Image (cartoon, helix red, strand yellow):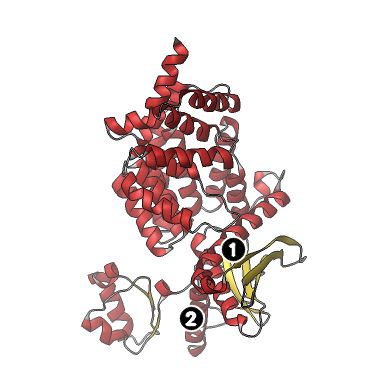
Amino acid sequence: FLFYVSKNAVASHHCLKEVNYATDLNMPLLSVHIEPTTLPRGLRLAILDRQAIMKHSLARSEYEARLRRAIKRQLESRGETEHAPSPVDERSVRKDRIHVAISSSSIGEAASTAQTIADGIARYVSWIGGIYRPHQKRAGIVDDQAIAIDYEIDVKVSRTNDSAVTSWFVHRADTAEVVWASQAEEAPEEFDAKCDRIAETIAEGAISAIADHEAQHISGLPLDELNYSHLLLTADQLNYHDPVRFAERLAVLKRAIDLEPNTGLAHGMLATLLSWKIINGVSSDAAADKFTLLEEAALALRYDPNEPFVLLAVGTAFCRIGEFDRGLGLIRRAHSMAPTIRSKDELARSLCFAGKPDEAIPLFEEILATMPAGHTFPYVRLAIAYVQAGRLDDAVEQSSAGTIHFSGDYYSWLVHSNVLALLGRSDEAHAALAEARRLLPKISLATVIERTEATYGHTEQQRHWLTGGLRALMREGET
């Protein structure tokens, strides 16, 4: 008998009856705690001597390995191993997911630190979630030998009195082809405090490199030859700002849902895609798209209610269509379960959607302060938050950085142009607007103003700060 322990479960009369029935029949009972929960006295006595797994405190790969071992022991004790069903939700061990083994190759004093970073990478890969499945590899042995590993991440740490260097490489498990290799150097006195951030940086970069590598191999294949993971990868590679690409992305996600209708990932991605269509005013039938969005969001939460990737996707979709309480609640929950830079960034952006820049700004500033060397911060997001809050001097610093680091992004130039105009720097504002027009010749300032105010402008003052400069430039252009 498998009992998933949560606050709702222990408060449910029906759940307690099922546990009592199982113990009355002396059935093997395994409790899996999905969140910290205080057990009522009667329930605590009933399962006191039974095995328990604290899922909420384990990385996904470690939890799955423990669950498999525990159920295998229970079945073996009952002589049922031969015909036993798979002990784990089949989605966690599917062969068409991308399985990644993480190991450390350091020796001596640095071995412990390297293993800490490797453990952190596994945790972040599981939190980033979706189609990737992390596995620990120690002494050359993967924690689940029944799974065919697709990629391996190896980490090495070397320390001297002057520096601490972390190096890593990602390679295909079958061909040993290296798809990404890099290193980071830190001051020795700061290194231990930064191990977790280094692990997250490696996990993010590794998944991005793996996604690009997989996309190259499946490029050009018809949709009916792609598995679920490859369909989601394909969808993620399609730029949905282009109407043709948007339609293709929609078709790919629907194909993925056809393949696995009871998995929440594609449903969540589809809800997010539709929310982008609605918020940018390119929906020909916003009411119908919103109805479909809500349906897909409900399905995503039904099938994967504890998957951070799904919670982020659905929460973002809700915030984009103005369902701020529901959306922020889901995003905050995802961030509490998987506190990543990605979830912090999504929370900050959604707070801006909700017109709460004072809450968003500290989150963006935390991300910027911890951004490793060589990584680029999305400056225009912080610029928008500063503009919402009326902090124009801070905003122009960030919007300027955005045009430097993202010189091909027309929207960064528009935000910069607006702030410059508000600050009375008219010539610079016109030059920035001209660059935005060069990048996107068909741009409509009236549409940009309308969508920006609808997305971020919750008060008259916010709307003035967000678009007042562009309005002035547009009036000047008319005269």
Q: Residue at x 48, y 81 (%)?
A: 71
On screen, residue 131 versus residue 226, left or right, reads left
On screen, residue 472 versus residue 42, left or right, reads right
Name the residue carrying label 2: 71
Element type at mark 2: helix
Of residues 466 and 24, the one nearer the viewer is 466
Q: Residue at x 58, y 53 (%)?
A: 375
Name the residue carrying label 1: 202
Of residues 348 and 163, the one nearer the viewer is 163
Residue 134: % across, % down: 57, 68
Above or below residue 94? Residue 263 is above
Residue 277: % across, % down: 46, 34
Residue 198: % across, % down: 55, 66
Binning the other alpha carbons within 10 Å of mark 1 as few (below 14), some (14 to 19) or many (20 upward) gives many
Residue 288: % across, % down: 40, 33
Element type at mark 1: helix
Residue 213 in view (yes/no)? yes
Q: Residue at x 42, y 74 (%)?
A: 57
Quadrant in the picture for the C terminus: top left
| Residue found at the very far top of the displayed protein | 479
Above or below residue 408? Residue 441 is above
Pointer 1 or 2: first along the chain: 2
